[in-house]
Amino acid sequence: MINIFKNCEVSKIFIFQLIVCALSSVICFCINVYSGLVALLSLLVMILIYYISTYKRYVKISELAGDVDKILHGDNTINLDSFSEGELAVLHSEIYKMTVRLREQQQKLLNDKVYLADSIADISHQIKTPLTSINLQLQLLSDPNITEERRQQLIRELYGLLSRIDWLIITLLKISKLDAGAIDFNKEKTSLKALIDKSVAALLVPIELKGQQLIINASGEFCGDINWSSEAIANIVKNCMEHTFEGGKIIIEASENALYSQITITDTGTGIKKEDMPHIFERFYKGKDSDDKSFGVGLALSRMIISAQNGTVKAENNLPCGAKFIIRFYKGII
């Protein structure tokens, strides 16, 4: 049972109404007994109706408070549709929005928790493989009968494994910064040719060692973060290089129009398998033809960098053979 008179404002109004009722009734009785009775009964009925409606409102508010308490304790199945009265309807609307938001945040937290657990498992797996190889190499190096030639070979392999771990950790840190929105991309203007030259500079020697041919046809301008964009392009070119046979070609074509700057990277390699196509830009996803040295984060980082700069990237197979990556940096919001 709710005692509405515990509210001091309600008590003050009740006292004020009784005083007004008494004064009005006295005045009416002075005029006429019947008038006094009618005035007294009318005022008492109005006061009664007012307090009945106030009591019902307090009951609704009490129910609403109970439902809010249930929501705060994890029960998100509360039905708030019964509140359709005036100011309670407004309050109901806001609580409904709060409930929806809590459900969304709860689901997001659950998804983030699952994603974090999967990511940690993937990262530990990716790092564990080269660490196992390093441990094996160190055991071989500790052999007192090892030849100098073999020792130098193992040292070179160790450097390679450490470089892979270093690259993975740096890449994961960059992905984490992008996820957190902690990177401010610069807006710089340069030619598409200069951007591509910067992107492939570190890959020229490996491409030459594999006997591959790099062809660049670029015109027009690019506006965006040159350093980050060149890294995104470099990861895609590196992926093409790794999936192209010796003596193959990697062709980069770039142009600009009124809407966007486009860079198309094609190769004459193995192409992309149908089952890999939907997942090729997913983090830690490794295609069926990927070698053991692949971590599956390069293309994911590229897409994040491009998307963060109002761009898009898509992959498809290039007939009759090879893969094609189409990158677009839009000049306006799409």
Image (cartoon, helix red, strand yellow):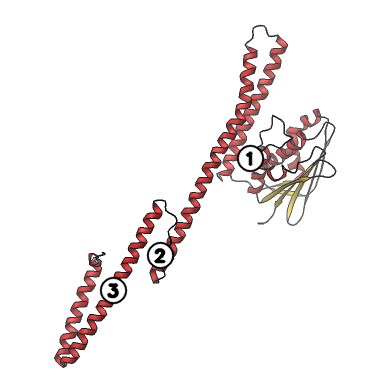
Quarter of the image that includes the C terminus: bottom right
Give me the disc on residue 52.
3
| Of residues 124 and 239, the one drawn nearer to the viewer in this rendering | 124
Which residue does the numbered mark 2 point to in the structure image? 91
Which of marks 3 and 1 precedes in the sequence?
A: 3
In three-dimensional space, the C-alpha distance between marks 1 and 3, rounded to whole angstroms, equals 63 Å
User: Tag 3 or tag 2, which sits nearer the N-term?
Assistant: 3
Q: Residue at x 61, y 33 (%)?
A: 170
Q: Relative to residue 181, is residue 99 depicted above or below?
A: below
Side of 208 where 97 appears, left or right: left
Residue 311 at x, y percent in the picture: 68, 50
Neighbour tally class for label 1: few under 14, some 14-19, many 20 plus, Cα within 10 Å: some
- Where residue 247 sits, quadrant-wise, is top right
Label 2 SS: helix
x, y percent for residue 290: 72, 34
Q: Which residue is mark 1?
A: 283
- Residue 324, label in figure: none
Quadrant in the picture for the N terminus: bottom left
Q: Secondary structure at mark 3?
A: helix
